[in-house]
Amino acid sequence: MSKKSFRDLKETIELKNAEIDELNIEIDAKNEEINKLKLYSTKLKYEKENLEYKLDSEISAEKARIKELDDLVKQINEKQTIIDDKQDQVKYLRSLIDDYKNQLKENTQNLEIQIRKISKTYEGLISQKDNIIEKQDENIRLLIKEKEEIIKSNKTNVISLKLQNDNYRKLLEKYEK
C-alpha cells in the first residue's frame, strides 16, 4: 500500500469519525429531546391522572348530591302522603262534627245554642287551615276532646230535658186535675 492511499484512508477514517461524532452529537441532542418529551409526557400523564382523580371525585360528589336529593324527594313525598292522610282525617272529623251538628239541630232549641258554638268553632277551624296543617296532631286531639265534651254536654242536656219534661208533665198533670 502506498502512503497516499494510507493517507487517503486515514483522512477518510477521520472524516467518518468526524461524521460519527456529529451523528453522536445529533443523537445526544435527540436523546435530550426524547428525555424532555418523556418528562413532558410523564408530566402530562400525571396531570391527566390528577384530572381524572378530580373528575372522579367530582362525579362521586355529584352522585352523592343526587342521591341526597333523591332521598329528600322521597322524604318529601312520604311527608306529603302523611299530610294528605292527616288532612283526610281532619275532613273525616269535620264530617263527624257536621253529623253531630245535624243531630243537635233535631233535638231542641237549647241544643241549637251548642250547635252555634260548634259552628263558630268550625268556622274558626276553616279560617285557620294553614295552621291546621302545621299543628294537625294537636288539633285532632282537640277535636276528639271537643267531641267528647259535646257528647257529655248532649247527655247532660238530654238528662236536663228529660227532667224538664218530667217537671212539665207533673205541672200539666196538676193543671189537668
Image (cartoon, grey):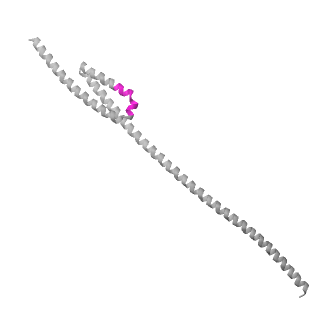
Quarter of image, res 52: bottom right
Quadrant of the image for the C terminus?
Answer: top left
On screen, residue 69 versus residue 29, left or right, reads left
**As drawn, which residue projects farthest toward the bottom?**
1
Answer above or below: position of 137 versus 18: above
Residue ID at (30%, 34%): 141
Residue ID at (28%, 24%): 102
Quarter of image, res 12: bottom right
Answer above or below: position of 59 versus 164: below
Residue ID at (17%, 19%): 164
- Number of numbered markers: 0
Quadrant of the image for the N terminus?
Answer: bottom right
Q: Position of residue 93 (x, y in %)?
A: 32, 32
Q: Position of residue 130 (x, y in %)?
A: 40, 31
Answer above or below: position of 55 versus 115: below
Quarter of image, res 99: top left
On whether residue 130 falls in the magenta region, the answer is: yes
Q: Position of residue 97 (x, y in %)?
A: 30, 28
Q: Position of residue 116 (x, y in %)?
A: 30, 21
The stretch in magenta equals 122-133
